[in-house]
Image: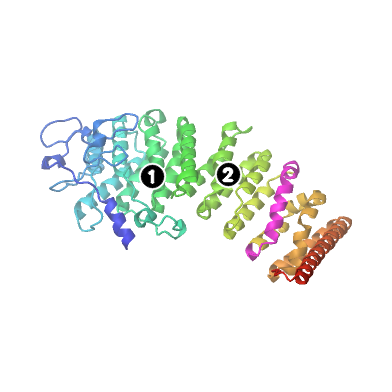
Amino acid sequence: MFKKIMKGGHRKPSKSDATDPSAYAFGPPGNCNSGSVSTTSVVVNHASRPGPAASGPNSNCATGVVTLTPPTGTIEPLPLFRDVPASERQNLFIRKLQICCYQFDFSDTLKSAREKEIKRQTLLELVDVIQSGSGKITETCQEEMIRMISVNIFRCLPPAAHENTGQENADPEEDEPYLEPSWPHLQLVYELLLRYVVSSDTDTKIAKRYIDHSFVLKLLDLFNSEDPREREYLKTILHRIYGKFMVHRPFIRKAINNIFYRFIYETERHSGVGELLEILGSIINGFALPMKEEHKLFLVRALIPLHKPKSIAIYHQQLSYCITQFVEKDFKLADTVVRGLLKYWPLTNCQKEVLFLGELEEVLEATQSAEFQRCMVPLFRQIARCLNSSHFQVAERALFLWNNEHIVGLIAQNRGVVLPIIFEALEKNIRSHWNQAVHGLTVNVRKMFMEMDIELFEECQRQYTEREMKAKDVEEQRELAWKRLADVAAQRGDYMVTV
């Protein structure tokens, strides 16, 4: 309850200082007569075009967008598009956009209920107009529409739960997501933007003037919203923008890079990492070959380090897909990926180890023999440690690697290197692992190696027995040396602590 009260306080829209009731009698755009509002009454100051309005009392924090809140009186519904002549529809379109620029307080469901419904119905009608594709909308209407969308969606997001309570070590997976109270309006605004972007009538040469780098950056900032419904819309819209506006593609990739860098090395908290990775999965799938150096650097500097944060479980599925896409696109990257996984391999987090082993299997499935040989020594040293893990899920998941035919084939080709590394781990499991399932799987893997190459297996067994004998001899010598020291101390009458 405390979280909701705190967050609700941050979402309350600012009150307008305007008191002129004539502001709600809309007229054609550009008229300055009494009872009309010009289209410039709603202002969006892009980051690239700073203006004085960005610091006004009604401005959204850090967005440069002025929000308008109806001060007094009521908003009157406008006629439907089908009820006016075609010549007046452009003016009516802009007047409807102006109505949709007004913000309401959704913390009280009864407050301004009639005006909220008028805005909702107006947004629905605007969505229908864009979706129907009845004709190209003019450049002026496009500009006003993007302004209206900006006024509604670009806003200050509330602080996360750990920022309100001061619990820095809270688990992000256990945080209750905050649902945006204005979603009935916000959803329709996002739907309008989506329909505009995907419409075949939208001319990218004109649209890119308004959906510019500043707009895209603000859109990316919204991915930190805790509301999963909003992030889902943002994911779809950004993906469509990436596909339609080729001029923005390098900029979008770089901006996502920067979000990841900040998440990895500074905050380790961001609500939209999974959604951004979903977009990247599709982008990576479309990379042309040979792969650009820029894309390889993105893999090494951003994607692989994303295995470091503690909250990886939230987005691991999407991250694993992106990593596997890189290896499937260019098999030579397998060695880089495997060594990257080993670099960030968890030491004390068993659930994270299980995730890593699952991802490792997917990567190895796309790995060819030459790349496998480059990384197999450090790889199977780590797998041997996993085989002996006291956490049965880690040991079990490591043994499941031998259920994959492709991986078994790679191991069989290089059994002379692999078996000596993991033989001791297999023997320890058979002798002393507490879990029966792990014990049974280990016996199966051991039998598999025997069938692959009985001579090699017997040689490894002989070497293991020799090492055991030597270790036993060393232990006996150590015990004998301590016994001699104890005897000498007893003869001298000295006090000696024996271990």
Instruction: Answer whether residue 59 is visible to the viewer in this image.
Output: yes
Q: Quadrant of the C terminus?
A: bottom right
Q: Marks 1 and 2: CB-CB under 8 Å?
A: no
Could you say which quadrant of the image residue 296 lies in?
top right
The label on residue 304 is 2
Of residues 257 and 210, the one drawn nearer to the viewer in this rendering: 257
Mark 2, Cα crowd under 10 Å, few <14 / some 14-19 / many 20+, is: many
- The numbered mark, 1 or 2, whose residue comes first in the sequence reads 1
Could you say where residue 148 lies in the image, as x and y percent from the top left? 28, 39
- Residues 329 and 495: in front is 495
Quadrant of the image containing the N terminus: bottom left
| Residue at point 52%, 53% (across, down) | 310
Looking at this view, is 397 or 152 the one in front?
397
Tell me, for residue 222, which label it has, or none: 1
Q: Secondary structure at mark 2?
A: helix
What span is colored magenta in the figure? 369-393
Q: CA distance from mark 1 to mark 2?
A: 24 Å
Quadrant assignment, res 454: bottom right
Q: Position of residue 347 (x, y in %)?
A: 61, 55
Above or below for 88 versus 313: above
Three-letter residue code for mark 1: Leu
Q: Secondary structure at mark 1?
A: helix
